[in-house]
């Protein structure tokens, strides 16, 4: 059995990861590849609902830091068992929890996942702010354009660190308004050649 190619797809809330990934899956399926897309936060939520009576993903950030770390490890264990040709893992490089930021991909998680590629999806801060305000399905903290720019900067810095720890190549892709197909095509081509 060939080991699944696990690909971390990261970016701050509002860059359009899920939208881009849905299009990437279509592209890969057209190439007859078996693709699975997993959302890290959803897997963490499933466990948190059982253990901590958490009701939604936004409540995860309110758990004690150690509880959040345990949920990260639990999700990594589940993801490491996925066996499609390509496993797309929708996640974050950092998570704001109160006044601090947690690493979304601490070393033990990276070791467990063994990613073959780490993709950072970005968007202009102004567009991210607009998308977040429009998304009524989540209870996110309202951030300023400047705070979003700071998160984008931190994610770029963490990208290199995570890629180094994983021994995996990295890719940065811009997802501007109305350019989902362009971003998905870049990612799809990179994954086909992986």
Image: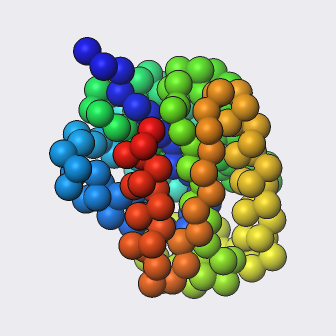
Q: Residue furthest front?
A: 193
Q: Examine the image and state in which quarter residue 122 appears.
A: bottom right
Viewer-proximal residue among 9 and 48: 9
Residue 59: tell me if it is visible.
no
Count of numbered badges drawn on the protein: 0
Q: In this view of the protein, can residue 113 be seen by the observer? A: yes
Q: Residue at x 62, y 44 (%)?
A: 170
**In the figure, is residue 37 to the left or right of 109?**
left
Q: Quadrant of the C terminus?
A: top left
Give the colour scheme of this rendering.
Answer: rainbow
Horizontal and vertical percent position of residue 169? 62, 38
Q: Quadrant of residue 46?
A: top left
Seen from the viewer's position, the closer of residues 8 and 68 is: 8
- Image-based side of 157 in relation to 42, left or right: right
| Image quadrant where one finds the N terminus | top left
Residue at (79%, 60%) from the top-left corner?
153
Rendered residue at 70%/46% (across/down):
159
Image: 150 above or below 188: below
Q: Is residue 144 left or right of residue 85?
A: right
The x and y percentages for residue 86 are: 34, 38
Q: Is residue 185 above or below residue 161?
A: below
Q: Position of residue 109 (x, y in %)?
A: 58, 26
The image shows residue 35 at horizontal and vertical percentages of 27, 43
* Image point (29%, 26%), residue name: 83
* Front residue of this view, candidates 49 and 111: 111
Which residue in the rendered view is the most extreme toward the top?
1
Depth check, front residue: 11 or 175: 175
């Amino acid at each position: 059995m060939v080991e699944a190619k696990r690909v971390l797809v990261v970016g701050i809330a509002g860059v359009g990861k899920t939208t881009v990934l849905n299009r990437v899956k279509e592209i890969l399926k057209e190439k007859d590849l078996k693709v699975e897309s997993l959302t890290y936060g959803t897997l963490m939520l499933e466990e948190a609902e059982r253990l901590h009576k958490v009701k939604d993903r936004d409540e995860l950030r309110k758990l004690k830091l150690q509880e959040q770390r345990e949920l990260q490890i639990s999700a990594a264990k589940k993801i490491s068992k996925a066996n499609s040709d390509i496993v797309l893992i929708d996640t974050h490089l950092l998570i704001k929890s109160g006044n601090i930021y947690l690493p979304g991909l601490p070393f033990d998680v990276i070791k467990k996942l063994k990613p073959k590629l780490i993709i950072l999806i970005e968007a202009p801060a102004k567009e991210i702010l607009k998308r977040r305000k429009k998304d009524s399905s989540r209870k996110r903290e309202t951030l300023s354009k400047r705070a979003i720019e700071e998160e984008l900067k931190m994610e770029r810095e963490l990208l290199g660190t995570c890629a180094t720890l994983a021994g995996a190549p990295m890719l940065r892709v811009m997802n501007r308004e109305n350019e989902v197909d362009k971003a998905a095509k870049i990612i799809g081509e990179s994954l086909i050649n992986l």
